[in-house]
Amino acid sequence: MKSFAILALTAIAGVFAAPAGDLEARQLGGSTANDFLRYGCKGVIMIYARASTEPGNIGSSVGPILQSGLGSRYRNNFAMQGVDYPADLASNFLPDGTLPSAITTMQNLLTKAANDCPNAKIAAGGYSQGTAVTAGAISRLPANIRNRIGAVVLFGYTKNLQNRGGIPNFPSNKLKVYCAVGDLVCTGTLIITLSHFTYLNDASGAVTFIANRLG
């Protein structure tokens, strides 16, 4: 099963970096976002982890749509910050579904946002391997930092079965999990089907969820 999953992941790795995705990323603002680290606090800050093999630090699929949608809602009072981590395919098979260093990197970003920006509203999210990064980071945060996070969105949640559709130590009403019918990563495997690439259709709804939660 593991060998089959590796082959499946390898076969689709190029999809995230396809020319069409690059074009979409350019149209929506690019595959890299460092608004928080470069420009500091805003009223709303989102920390986002991309999928395996995606370019930049927010990728070329769901991330730029969230960036564009939230940027339109909050105008000059929004910061999108991607998580810089390797996002290699092999890390999906680690116990946490990603590298420990990736989880630590996201923890540090969320902690910095909470400590440096006491008046900011904080959101987080991830796609595919990025969901493991996000869930791992949030579940390990101290309560005072974790409580500052007002909304989390996960697309193609690779730890969905293991974590029973949630994030340990995080309120379910602040979390929206998008698991498409037929996406087998949501059922406890790492077998990739075409359903795993349908989350562009859910990104605008995720923007609405985040805005409703944050106000």
Image: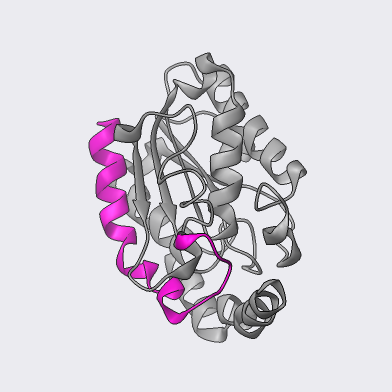
Q: Where does the image place residue 206, in percent across and percent down from the top left?
A: 31, 52
Left/right of residue 84 with respect to residue 116 in the rendered view: right
Q: Read off the magenta span.
A: 187-215
Q: Quadrant of the N terminus?
A: bottom right
Front residue of 116/38: it is: 116
Nearer to the camera, 159 or 60? 159
**Residue 71 position within the rendered picture, expressed as x and y whole percent measured from the top left:** 37, 49
Does the magenta segment cover residue 11? no
Quarter of the figure with the C terminus:
top left
Residue 58, compared with residue 8, is above or below; it is above
Look at the magenta stretch and give its main secondary structure: helix
Could you tell me which residue is drawn at 50 percent across and 65 percent down? 185
| In magenta stretch: residue 213 | yes
For residue 8, above or below residue 154: below
- Residue lying at 46% horizontally and 61% vertically, measured from the top left: 187
Q: Report if residue 33 is visible in the image.
A: no
Query: Could you tell me how many numbered marks the image carries?
Result: 0
Residue under the image location 69 percent in, 50 percent down: 84
